Amino acid sequence: MQKRIEIMNATLTDDQLRFTCQAEGDEAERKASGQMLVDSDHFAFVYILELADSFEYVIIKENVWPELKQAHSDRKPVFLEAGSQMIELSGLHEELEYLLENIKDNANYGEEMEEKVRSVFL
């Protein structure tokens, strides 16, 4: 079973972007993986967190893309506030850059996903 963490909101400050969520299992030791995927069916980027024996998927939907774009443009660090943990999503900018380049003019992600990404990021 996939464990999903839905981003509730994003707060952009002078020095960082902070995603907040409702995370279950706050006692779990989460680690940034530095890897991302695309969920083109739900119009989201997905950051992978590592747990001791599994993974959690941080779902970054289009409602927080404007803040993500600004943080990406300014290369501000991105953090996930998950319960009592504050996790830097290391490698996010590099992964996002790679995904944006792949999505641009690529029908494999679907026309609607490509258009949504283009309207915010490109």
Image (cartoon, rainbow, N blue to C red):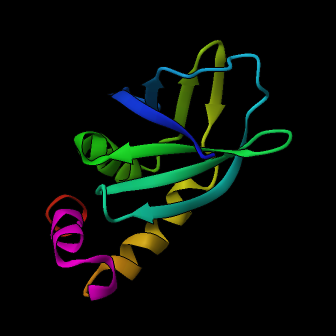
35 with respect to 33 (left or right): left
Q: Nearer the viewer, residue 74 or 105?
A: 105
Specify the segment rendered in magenta: 107-117
Residue 62's spot in the image, x, y percent? 25, 48
> Does residue 61 belong to the magenta stretch?
no
Q: Residue furthest right?
A: 52
Residue occupying image coordinates x 25% and y 77%: 110
Q: Residue furthest front?
A: 1
Residue occupying image coordinates x 65% and y 31%: 87
Query: For residue 38, what is the image quadrant?
Result: bottom left
Q: Residue furthest top?
A: 84
115 with respect to 105 (left or right): left
87 with respect to 54 (left or right): left
Residue 40's spot in the image, x, y percent? 33, 65
So how many labels did they put on this image? 0
Residue occupying image coordinates x 29% and y 40%: 64
Q: Nearer the viewer, residue 72 or 74?
A: 72
Query: For residue 102, what is the image quadrant?
Result: bottom left
Name the quadrant of the C terminus: bottom left
Residue occupying image coordinates x 55% and y 60%: 36
Q: Nearer the viewer, residue 9 or 74?
A: 9
Magenta-highlighted stretch: main secondary structure? helix
Residue 37's spot in the image, x, y percent? 51, 63
Q: Nearer the viewer, residue 1 or 98?
A: 1
Give the vertical position of 31 relative to 25 (above or below).
Answer: below
Can residue 106 be spotted in the picture? no
Can residue 24 be spotted in the picture? yes
Give the vertical position of 31 relative to 102 (above or below).
Answer: above
Residue 121's spot in the image, x, y percent? 25, 62
